[in-house]
Image (cartoon, helix red, strand yellow):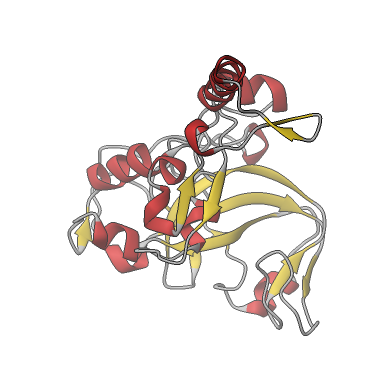
Amino acid sequence: MKTKKYKVNRDNVYVGEVIKTDTIYRWNEEYEFFRTKPGQLNTGSYYPYRSMLFVPNEENLASDLLYRSPNYPILNITEDNICLNFEKGNIVVKESYNLSELLKYYGFNQYLTFEDIVLIRKTFFTGNFAKDHCHLFGWKETMAESVTFYTNGNIVTNPKELEKLRTKFRKEQQAGHRMFIGTSENILPREYWDILDARGDNSLMDAIEWNQKMNAFKPHKQEGPIKKLSRF
């Protein structure tokens, strides 16, 4: 997109990962490989740049909804030959997911403005949204009260020792080390569980520990001088 004055169809909004890679190939095995289905395109090793909210344009290239980015090819959406013949070391969008069911569930209109997209980015890509709403995607958080603790192979039953272990567990949860178990029911597609927080912002701790940006959508300097959308 060039300016903020756009309207896009809710059903065409995707999130994906902008990456740089030297290798794009077709996965021809009979089994799924890291969410790549047989016959789809995959990449070799790659360098992750950032997350992107986008709609495919007329050529099925990614039209960035937050920044004035180049229209990058999208693996398994853009024509395969364009991706397979892409120059070594160029930039593509990988692992794209359509957000229409999520947006419809939360009451977003059929046609979205720039302001809607900003709200979507701030609401669903905090880095914790999927965890905080895990029941929607078929997961349940494990709380300290439901954990069975063991010491030297024996179940801890002493109330004081049990409370001490539960307090430690709660502190680890607060630090971001949370545990979840799958359930048999989900309201929204389970694939959102895998993607929303993965494409979301990083905490200060994660940013320092893993040398990542806190703002997951901020363009990478290797993309060139990419600006925010203008008003006109």
In depth, the one of 142 and 134 nearer the eye is 142
Q: How many marks?
A: 0
x and y percent of residue 15 in the render?
Answer: 47, 55
Point 54% across, 27% down: residue: 173
Residues 9 and 29: in front is: 29
Q: Is 209 positioned to the left or the right of 68 in the image?
A: right
Position of residue 193 in the picture relative to residue 40 (left or right)? left
Viewer-proximal residue among 113 and 196 = 196
- Identified at 74% across, 69% down, the residue is 33
Spot occupied by residue 170 in the image (x, y as percentages of width and height): 52, 23
- Quarter where residue 129 is shown: top left
Left or right of residue 43, residue 14 in this image? left
Measuring from the top left, give residue 89's x and y in whole percent. Answer: 78, 53
Q: Residue at x 43, y 58 (%)?
A: 137
For residue 9, say whether it is visible. no
The image quarter containing residue 147 is: top right
Q: Is residue 9 above or below residue 15?
A: below
Q: Nearer the viewer, residue 228 or 45?
A: 45
Q: Residue at x 67, y 50 (%)?
A: 19
